[in-house]
Image (spheres, coloured by chain):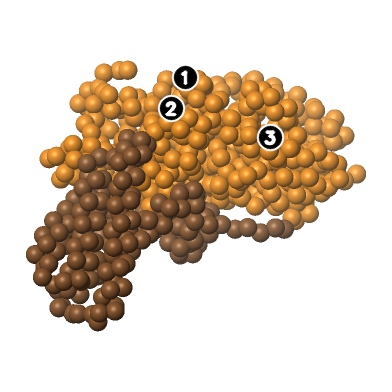
Chain colours: A brown, B orange
């Protein structure tokens, strides 16, 4: 976690591009657009052409954030009632299965396999196991040792491989908003005179 | 390929290890290899070859970064496919970044993460340029600009001769012996630039703009010293040469004390001066820079020129140059102008910031070794044009014009390719 924060601090210290050209648009609006509509299937071709993968990706990432959130909850020994616990377990099973689906797609689709390296597989497996381990711990606290091993390996690996996109994703969307906003490309203007 | 020395490797790696801001670091660390960008690339669309997936282009640059700048890359390179910057990597870099990318930026807009793939490709080209691996054909175009002041190597006397007979044509066309194409005048409102393809191959587009300036009663001039709007060093990735070329235009603006710099219909040229130029020369420009597309729209909006909305009856479509639209933010102005002139205007699908590249971008027109690929990807544009049923294709970019003319022949489209200025000039109503 600390290493991820260091990545973030480094990015913040390096700061925004110092652009000498004359700004034409609104960076704030473009950045907001970058994180919202620009990512929706209505606007993003990579989403609307691959809706099953996009949907699996959304579930998978929501499951990851939920698991990280629950990691902190477990640290404070907070417990949920049975119904809420069941809902969380159900969601994590769906997100974990989504992760497995993405992993299988990577293994069988030639374009993806050509693009992949061992880190891609390791990262997916670690996160998927972490999600299942979180579900397992919610189901029964006796599985704490399995959970602890899964969480430790994941957290140790997190800042080194592709998983550090946890930090860089937000920076990338911001930079896209900055670039397109500066030049008045985002948010798209559709008006007739 | 010239031998790769340690000095060259050092020069190349410096591009990836020096950070002016957080942008490069961000985009080198963001790609998750999801491969969903594939269909956004015209090269992949026509070939369905994994070699052309845009993420591959990011990955080859990022893999070199990882090898020399990350813990895993330095110690367990196989884990992240971190690559040495060796001769085989350089060969692949050249083919992927110069030979398989028009720098159209469509993949960036549709990347699931938000990786600025176009920016990473530019950085990769910058590495290759520093190491001396710019394709000779592309470098020849840059050299012509560096050595002669324009990328076609047109001698000044040939240029002035061309302008002289164009001026005679203008006098005849507007029926006014006082009509001129002013040269090198100080304190004008507009210094107009040209794509050197205009004096060399398409002089009528200069006539068209001169006629528009005449109708608008504009205070304008051309410079015989520096009129070239293009900057092929933007494509080659050589920042020093890009700086020299951009500086020349800035110097001429300052020398002539012009108030507005109007960039001719050239997608990359307008981007290279309006958006990248100030960063090349590290200077905020003290004058207005705008494209001729914006100026034409301004003239019509303000009533400085009048156009006949009934003269043109044919079906017209518009090709959006990537660097003008997706990378330059000029989207509505050309549509405003066309709607004032053409009753039958049909958009391509997709269009605007989603439009497909014609195939001539990224310096492809200059790199004859990739002509086969270039004309193959042109098939996508040909299909788009055919689907509109248009007989006139307007595009505000001379490189796109060149590519579309070849596409027209190759794919037997039987359409007429025009610039926006030509369309406006044909529709002008000249006051008596």
Q: Judging from the image, what secondary structure is the residue with disc 1 in?
A: helix
Q: Which mark is residue A134?
A: none
Q: Nearer the viewer, residue A16 or B354?
A: B354
Question: Would you say B173 lies left or right of B363 here?
Answer: right
The image shows residue B43 at horizontal and vertical percentages of 48, 32
Q: Residue at x 57, y 30 (%)?
A: B378
Question: Would you say B301 lies left or right of B352 here?
Answer: right
Pointer 3 or 1: first along the chain = 1
Asked whether the residues under the numbered discs 3 and 1 touch, taking CB atoms below 8 Å apart as contact, a structural biologist would say no
Q: Nearer the viewer, residue B250 or A7?
A: A7
Asked whether the residues under the numbered discs 2 and 1 touch, taking CB atoms below 8 Å apart as contact, a structural biologist would say yes
Q: Judging from the image, what secondary structure is the residue with disc 2 in?
A: loop
Which residue is label 2 attached to? B99
Q: Which mark is residue B386?
A: 3
Question: Would you say B314 lies left or right of B75 here?
Answer: right
Q: Which mark is residue B369?
A: 1
Query: In the rendered structure, the residue with mark 2 lies on which chain?
Result: B
Question: Would you say B102 lies left or right of A175 here?
Answer: right
Q: Residue at x 34, y 29 (%)?
A: B93
């Amino acid at each position: 976690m600390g290493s991820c924060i260091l990545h973030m601090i480094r990015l913040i210290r390096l700061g925004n591009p110092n652009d000498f050209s004359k700004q034409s648009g609104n960076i704030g609006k473009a950045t907001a657009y970058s994180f919202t509509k620009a990512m929706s299937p209505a606007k993003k071709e990579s989403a609307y052409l691959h809706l099953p993968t996009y949907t699996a990706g959304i579930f998978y990432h929501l499951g990851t954030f939920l698991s990280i959130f629950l990691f902190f909850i477990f640290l404070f020994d907070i417990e949920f009632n049975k119904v809420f616990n069941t809902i969380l377990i159900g969601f994590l099973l769906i997100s974990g299965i989504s992760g497995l689906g993405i992993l299988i797609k990577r293994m069988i689709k030639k374009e993806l396999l050509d693009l992949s390296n061992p880190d891609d597989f390791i990262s997916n497996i670690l996160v998927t196991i972490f999600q299942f381990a979180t579900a397992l711990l919610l189901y029964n606290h006796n599985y704490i040792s399995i959970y602890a091993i899964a969480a430790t390996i994941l957290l140790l690996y997190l800042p080194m491989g592709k998983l550090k996109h946890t930090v860089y994703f937000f920076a990338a969307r911001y930079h896209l908003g900055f670039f397109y906003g500066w030049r008045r490309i985002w948010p798209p203007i559709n008006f007739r005179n | 390929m010239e031998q790769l020395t340690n000095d060259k490797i050092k020069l190349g790696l410096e591009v990836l290890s020096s950070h002016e801001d957080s942008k490069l670091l961000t985009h080198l660390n963001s790609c998750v290899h999801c491969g969903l960008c594939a269909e956004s690339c015209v090269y992949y669309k026509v070939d369905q070859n994994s070699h052309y997936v845009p993420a591959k282009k990011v990955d080859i640059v990022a893999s070199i970064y990882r090898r020399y700048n990350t813990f895993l890359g330095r110690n367990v390179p196989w884990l992240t496919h971190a690559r040495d910057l060796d001769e085989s990597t350089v060969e692949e870099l050249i083919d992927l970044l110069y030979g398989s990318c028009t720098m159209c930026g469509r993949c960036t807009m549709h990347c699931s993460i938000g990786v600025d793939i176009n920016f990473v490709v530019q950085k990769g080209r910058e590495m290759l340029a520093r190491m001396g691996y710019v394709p000779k054909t592309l470098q020849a175009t840059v050299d012509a600009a560096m050595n002669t002041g324009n990328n076609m190597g047109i001698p000044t006397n040939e240029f002035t001769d061309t302008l002289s007979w164009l001026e005679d044509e203008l006098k005849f066309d507007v029926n006014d012996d006082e009509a001129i194409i002013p040269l090198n005048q100080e304190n004008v409102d507009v210094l107009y630039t040209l794509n050197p393809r205009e004096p060399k191959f398409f002089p009528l587009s200069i006539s068209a703009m001169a006629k528009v300036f005449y109708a608008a009663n504009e205070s304008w001039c051309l410079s015989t010293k520096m009129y070239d709007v293009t900057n092929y060093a933007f494509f080659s990735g050589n920042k020093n040469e890009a700086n020299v070329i951009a500086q020349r235009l800035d110097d001429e603006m300052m020398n002539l004390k012009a108030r507005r710099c109007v960039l001719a219909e050239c997608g990359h040229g307008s981007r290279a001066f309006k958006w990248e130029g100030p960063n090349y020369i590290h200077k905020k420009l003290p004058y207005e820079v705008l494209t001729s597309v914006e100026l034409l729209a301004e003239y019509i909006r303000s009533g400085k020129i009048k156009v006949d909305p009934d003269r043109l009856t044919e079906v017209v479509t518009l090709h959006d140059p990537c660097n003008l639209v997706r990378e330059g933010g000029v989207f509505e102005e050309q549509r405003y102008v066309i709607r004032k002139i053409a009753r039958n205007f049909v958009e391509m699908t997709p269009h605007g910031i989603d439009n497909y590249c014609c195939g001539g971008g990224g310096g492809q027109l200059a790199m004859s070794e990739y002509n086969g690929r270039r004309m193959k990807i042109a098939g996508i544009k040909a299909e788009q044009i055919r689907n509109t049923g248009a007989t006139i294709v307007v595009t505000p970019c001379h490189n796109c014009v060149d590519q579309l003319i070849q596409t027209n022949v190759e794919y037997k489209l039987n359409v007429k390719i025009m610039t926006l200025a030509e369309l406006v000039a044909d529709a002008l109503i000249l006051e008596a």
